[in-house]
Image (cartoon, coloured by chain):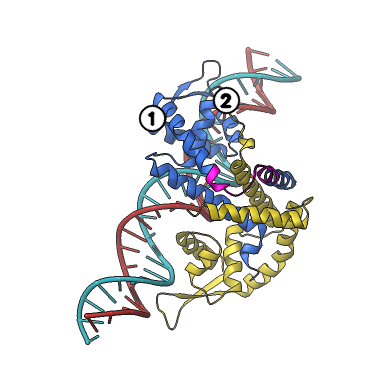
Chain colours: A blue, B yellow, C cyan, D red
Amino acid sequence: MEKLDGILFYSLEKAIKCYRQFAQRNMMKHGFDLTIDQWLVLKAISDNPDWTQQEIAEAAFKDFASVTRIVEILVKKQYLTRTIHINDRRRFNLTPTDKATVNLQTMQPITESNRKKALDGISKDEVAQLHEYLTKIIENCKS
Amino acid sequence: MEKLDGILFYSLEKAIKCYRQFAQRNMMKHGFDLTIDQWLVLKAISDNPDWTQQEIAEAAFKDFASVTRIVEILVKKQYLTRTIHINDRRRFNLTPTDKATVNLQTMQPITESNRKKALDGISKDEVAQLHEYLTKIIENCKS
DNA sequence: TGCATTTAATTGACATATCAATTATAATTG
DNA sequence: CAATTATAATTGATATGTCAATTAAATGCA
């Protein structure tokens, strides 16, 4: 078999999977009970409290259905409250609880440290380069 | 919110998701009834018929549980036959059917074209560079 | 040989991804 | 205003990821 490690997209997949596992491990190690997807959605909502779930989904590059389910979990875990939107009864107001705010803040430095450790040995310029390549791939795959 | 697009790992995630969607679309467009994960596992088995499922899982960077389930589906879809291993009754012989062999061959140029299109505008050297960065990230996240 | 350990694979539970269908409401337009 | 269309969100089905527990068979060692 052509070695899988020799195929770029395989390494791409492996890199993101490794990073997710790494980030999740460190999150748990610090006693947090959120998955990184839940964290991401919570953070997106917290930073954009007026967005629809669909807008949140787009920003987080998640499926609408996934966001619906993640929001459910976040409400159940008491990180979000959900109330009906006054002007549009199809929508909801999603409001992070105090618990959410505190946890997001406590988590922030851990997340930053995770990112830093994962990029250890890659210079700022190289990261920028890498970023450009990824953006190019994203563009190419839109066709 | 710090724009998600500005975070490398978010773009990493987005890039691989985009590529998977792109590859899957093209696969379907040509009438194949496999997911790209099923295809990957089938290809790994086809190229290494003597490996254990665990070895296949490692090569494809998949969970053992996932491989078990994907193999089940491949058997059901008549891409694999499963017989008991003579020397080790814990194992199975996984043998691609003729249908599998034909499909893998027909698929190969499509896969290559997918990869090529997705990397359009990125030179060979740059791909090599990108690959190195990814390998570095994978290493960093093992800690 | 007999028992503990290791290994190969499966299974269960839950989270997420994806696609299609559905519901409820809002907006548009004839 | 009524009928159509568009939008926000949910739901169902299936596939995969992840973790833990389990089963069955092989191996190692006293």
Residue at horizontal 39%, vertical 39%? A33
Residue at horizontal 50%, vertical 39%? A111
Query: On the image, numbered disc 2 is attached to which residue?
Result: A51
> Element at badge 2?
loop
Badge 1 crowding class, 10 Å Cα cut-off, few under 14, some 14 to 19, many 20 or more, is: some
Instruction: Decide which of B122, B80 is in the foreground and name it.
Output: B122
Q: Return the chain for callout 1.
A: A
Q: In this rendering, is residue B79 above or below A17?
A: below
In this rendering, position of residue A107 left or right of residue B107? left
> Element at badge 1?
loop
Q: Position of residue A32 (x, y in %)?
A: 39, 39
The quarter holding residue B99 reads bottom right
Q: Position of residue B16 (x, y in %)?
A: 63, 49
Instruction: Decide which of B57, C9 is in the foreground and name it.
Output: B57
Quadrant location of the N terminus of chain A? bottom right
The quarter holding residue A48 reads top right
- Determine if residue A122 is in view: yes
Question: Closer to the N terminus: mark 2 or mark 1?
Answer: 2
Q: Position of residue B85 (x, y in %)?
A: 45, 79
Q: In this rendering, is residue A22 above or below D24?
A: above
The residue under label 1 is which amino acid type? Answer: Gln
Q: In this rendering, is residue B38 above or below B119?
A: below
In this rendering, position of residue B70 left or right of residue C29? left
Q: Return the chain for callout 2.
A: A
Q: Which residues are magenta?
A: A116-129
Q: Per the image, is B40 magenta?
A: no
Residue at horizontal 55%, vertical 30%? A53
The residue under label 2 is which amino acid type? Answer: Trp
Q: Per the image, is A119 magenta?
A: yes
Query: On the image, numbered disc 1 is attached to which residue?
Result: A78
- Determine if residue A69 is in view: no
